[in-house]
Image (cartoon, rainbow, N blue to C red):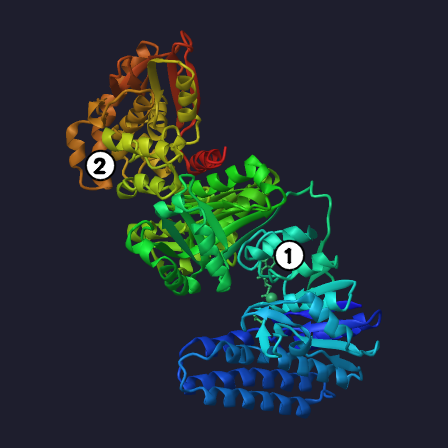
């Protein structure tokens, strides 16, 4: 004998009913089958809505008609697909059932809320009708059917809405039913009967429990639970990405998973199966071939300790404190007994070591009832303040991590706490299951999905994911996206995944999701209608703190650079090719560093000096290991390297500048390059990096051009006026050449921190002598590197090299 249970998701429409009937028939070819059915998806919710909300009678009847329509539509469609279906007969039954319901509703208009026994009757109609539909599908295919009435045979104790089954009594009754061995056995799930023969429900989602009970009562060899997912996953696959199917789990693990919220199985389902040692398989009606998850007795737990991450939402936490708890040992027991009597389930308990304070979590809907009960239990104690006021926090969730002997594994707890800590998610309480199968955390409900994803990734997913928020899509930003795309497979082979979450420029923003192919981002960006400004960005970053989130600034915007501190506080690393922050006044420069340190975030800006050349990292390595700068000299501007190189070839200053501009080596206005300010900024960044506390104004800039050039109103005017400087420069180049030297625009840091940028005559022994054509060169004379300096030389500008520098920084965030 095999038991098959079909959940609401497997009976949601005509096709699904027929698919379930096919599965039943196929199994019947091998052995006798017993079938437990739930109500079609959403039906119970409709019915609960009717009984729980204080809606007026007309609204109730409307809802009832909606539910009736769903059933009629299902059977109409069954008739359309299979013309042999006993449509009229089934329709009559549906109408009778709904007329009964309407009568019940009309009879109780004077009550605000229906009594529980009536609620139970209304809520159970979905299951009853599922059985009628299935019976008539099977009957029309010439199968004999025996229906077991659960009110008479599944005997339970407890409340009308949430009863527990007495298996022995139920077994006795069922054994007395005369069932032909050729018959298919059908029973509605979710329903039982109390000793008085009244209908009592087994709690929401309870037809899994019914299935387990019937399997035990019929001595079935196997209990198959058919649903809409392939089995039990490491977390709810509909909410969490990258979950894994569990091939098999032990009864204990299944119990713990379901108790802490994996709603694929009802929490009470496993206990009876375990008692009678009946294996259970969870299978998918939409993917029959999949093997599913086997739940059975297991002795070997050694492999794969971790089994899942689950959640229970809508939780309230009560904290009770006061001397009474310390003085009278049984205070807590008294509270628990009272709640148990009232059928209130305490999901989690934590107790402070000082012993005068303890907390427990319950479903939020029980809050009011518990509060009244506690006030009745301790009226004087609360008045006299030997029990302090009861503190209640609502809108909470419980997140649990389930696995065998989990509490013994130090690295699991540390991964859980550190991953949440990094994402700035607060934990309100912690509890380790006494069974050693779970660790549970109480957190705000608003954080639950994000926390589950974070913890699931940290525990189950080896991949390191970097979430990128990219601002600025000029040349560098665009090249960066291209490089990330190009490297996707290579990085995947190293278990690294870069997920670009947003791309923005000063006006617009594009949110990337699974539907947008990054390859087509430019088109998607053009089509995006989302506005962008700092306020929007700030809100977005607040709501999106994934683990390993990085803000990349590829703009030259000063206002954005002033926000970095905020971004660290929101849990982001910051990578920037924008020099504004590092050349801002020292106060902000320092604040950035102290905040990043405090928040344990990285601030990376390798491309601020020398683009992709490894300047900053090299300097940091030297100075972290005890080296000291004696002197620095460098050519820090690609455009000036080009222009001064050309002067040697007897090209006029104005022509060389024009050529540099045409090749894209200069700023839009070449006056900005020739002013020397950009070189001064880079020098400032280097000087600060080696510890000199200086401001931009402290750098002595010897301008290349006289002051009056600054007054030029247009680029054209500037380039025209520049011709005036051609002759003086021919003279300077000639003079240098006569001494065997060349002209270079050099930034210098002397010992003590004195900094200057100016044109220098360089002789042929100097490493800067040969540097031209847009190359940069940086020479560091240090304690370790002297008399021959450490030289870094290469292209120090250009979109590709700068983007690759940003990319390298990005990968450093996960190292
Ligand atoms: P049914 O109607 O078949 O009883 P349920 O909706 O009660 O179906 O249960 C199946 C659902 O349980 C799945 O669709 C899935 O979203 C959810 N679920 C929650 N946690 C898990 C988990 N760990 N593994 C699989 N499914 C889960
Ligand atoms: N139909 C009931 C519910 O939705 C029982 C079940 O589906 O298991 O709770
Ligand atoms: Mg279910």
Q: Is residue 671 left or right of residue 158?
A: left
Q: Is residue 370 left or right of residue 286?
A: left
The answer to whether residue 470 shows anywhere in this view is: no
The answer to whether residue 688 shows anywhere in this view is: yes
| Quarter assignment of residue 549 | top left
- Residue ID for mark 2: 718
Q: Is mark 1 within 8 Å of ligand 1?
A: yes
| Quarter assignment of residue 691 | top left
- Residue ID for mark 1: 232
Q: Residues within 10 Å of mark 2 (few under 14, many from 20)?
A: some
Q: Is residue 517 left or right of residue 16?
A: left
The quarter of the image that holds ligand 1 is bottom right
Front position in the image: 331 or 206 = 331
Instruction: From the top left corner, tell me how far across and down residue 396 is, in percent.
Output: 42, 55
Q: Is residue 380 left or right of residue 143?
A: left
Q: CA distance from mark 1 to mark 2?
A: 72 Å
């Amino acid at each position: 004998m095999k038991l098959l249970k079909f959940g609401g998701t497997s009976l949601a429409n005509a096709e699904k009913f027929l698919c379930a009937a096919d599965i039943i028939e196929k199994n019947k070819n091998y052995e006798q089958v017993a079938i437990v059915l739930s109500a079609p998806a959403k039906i119970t919710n409709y019915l609960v809505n009717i009984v729980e909300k204080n809606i007026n009678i007309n609204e109730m009847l409307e809802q009832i008609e909606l539910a009736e329509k769903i059933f009629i539509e299902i059977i109409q469609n069954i008739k359309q697909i299979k013309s042999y279906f006993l449509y009229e007969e089934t329709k009559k039954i549906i109408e009778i059932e709904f007329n009964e319901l309407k009568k019940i509703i009309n009879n109780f208009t004077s009550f605000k809320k229906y009594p529980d026994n009536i609620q139970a009757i209304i809520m159970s109609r979905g299951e009853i009708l599922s059985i009628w539909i299935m019976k008539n599908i099977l009957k029309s295919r010439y199968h004999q059917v025996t229906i077991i009435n659960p009110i008479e045979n599944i005997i339970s104790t407890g409340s009308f809405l949430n009863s527990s089954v007495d298996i022995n009594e139920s077994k006795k009754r069922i054994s007395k039913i005369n069932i032909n061995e050729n018959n298919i056995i059908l029973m509605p799930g979710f329903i039982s009967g109390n000793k008085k023969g009244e209908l009592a429900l087994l709690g929401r989602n309870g037809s899994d429990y019914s299935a387990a009970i019937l399997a035990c009562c019929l001595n079935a060899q196997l209990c198959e639970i058919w649903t809409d997912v392939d089995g039990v996953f490491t977390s709810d696959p509909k909410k969490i990405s990258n979950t894994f199917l569990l091939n098999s789990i032990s009864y204990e693990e299944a119990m713990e998973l379901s108790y802490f919220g994996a709603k694929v199985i009802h929490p009470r389902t496993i206990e009876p199966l375990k008692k009678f040692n009946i294996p259970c398989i969870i299978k998918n009606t939409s993917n029959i071939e999949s093997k599913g998850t086997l739940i059975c007795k297991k002795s070997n737990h050694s492999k794969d300790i971790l089994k899942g991450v689950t959640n229970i939402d809508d939780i309230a936490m009560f904290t009770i404190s006061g001397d009474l708890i310390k003085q009278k040992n049984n205070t807590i027991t008294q509270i628990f007994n009272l709640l148990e009597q009232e059928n209130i389930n305490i999901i989690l308990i934590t107790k402070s070591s000082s012993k005068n304070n303890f907390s427990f979590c319950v479903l939020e809907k029980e809050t009011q009832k518990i509060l009244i009960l506690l006030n009745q239990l301790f009226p004087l104690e609360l008045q006299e303040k030997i029990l302090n006021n009861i503190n209640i926090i609502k809108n909470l969730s419980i997140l649990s991590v389930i696995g065998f002997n989990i509490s013994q594994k130090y690295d699991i707890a540390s991964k859980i706490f550190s991953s949440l800590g990094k994402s700035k998610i607060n934990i309100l309480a912690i509890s380790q299951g006494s069974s050693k199968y779970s660790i549970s955390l109480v957190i705000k409900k608003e954080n639950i999905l994000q926390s589950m994803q974070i913890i699931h990734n940290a525990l189950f997913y080896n991949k390191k994911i970097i979430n990128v928020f990219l601002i600025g899509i000029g040349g560098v930003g665009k090249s960066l996206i291209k490089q990330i795309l190009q490297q996707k497979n290579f990085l995947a082979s190293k278990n690294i995944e870069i997920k670009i979450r947003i791309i923005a420029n000063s006006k617009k923003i594009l949110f990337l999701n699974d539907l947008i192919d990054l390859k087509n981002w430019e088109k998607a960006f053009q089509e995006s209608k989302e506005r962008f400004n700092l306020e929007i960005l700030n809100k977005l970053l607040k709501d999106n703190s994934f683990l390993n989130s990085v803000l990349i600034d590829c703009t030259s915007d000063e206002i954005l650079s002033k926000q970095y501190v905020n971004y660290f506080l929101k849990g982001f690393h910051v990578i920037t090719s924008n020099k504004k922050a590092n050349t801002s006044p020292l106060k902000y420069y320092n604040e950035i560093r102290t905040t990043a340190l405090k928040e344990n975030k990285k601030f990376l800006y390798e491309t601020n000096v020398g683009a992709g050349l490894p300047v900053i990292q090299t300097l940091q390595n030297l100075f972290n290991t005890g080296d000291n700068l004696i002197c620095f000299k460098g050519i820090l501007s690609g455009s000036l390297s080009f222009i001064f190189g050309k002067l040697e070839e007897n090209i006029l200053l104005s022509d060389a500048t024009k050529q540099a501009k045409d090749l894209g080596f200069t700023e839009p206005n070449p006056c900005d390059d020739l002013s020397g300010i950009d070189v001064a900024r880079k020098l400032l960044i280097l000087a600060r990096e080696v510890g000199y506390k200086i401001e931009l104004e402290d750098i002595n800039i010897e301008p290349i051009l006289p002051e009056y050039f600054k007054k030029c109103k247009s680029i054209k005017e500037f380039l025209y006026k520049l011709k005036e400087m051609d002759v003086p420069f021919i003279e300077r180049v000639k003079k240098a050449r006569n001494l065997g030297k060349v002209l270079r625009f050099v930034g210098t840091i002397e010992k003590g921190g004195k900094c200057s940028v100016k044109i220098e005559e360089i002789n042929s022994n100097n490493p800067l002598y040969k540097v031209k054509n847009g190359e940069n060169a940086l020479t560091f004379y240090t304690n370790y590197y002297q008399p021959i300096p450490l030289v870094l030389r290469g292209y120090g500008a250009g979109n590709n090299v700068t983007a690759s520098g940003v990319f390298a920084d990005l990968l450093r965030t996960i190292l």
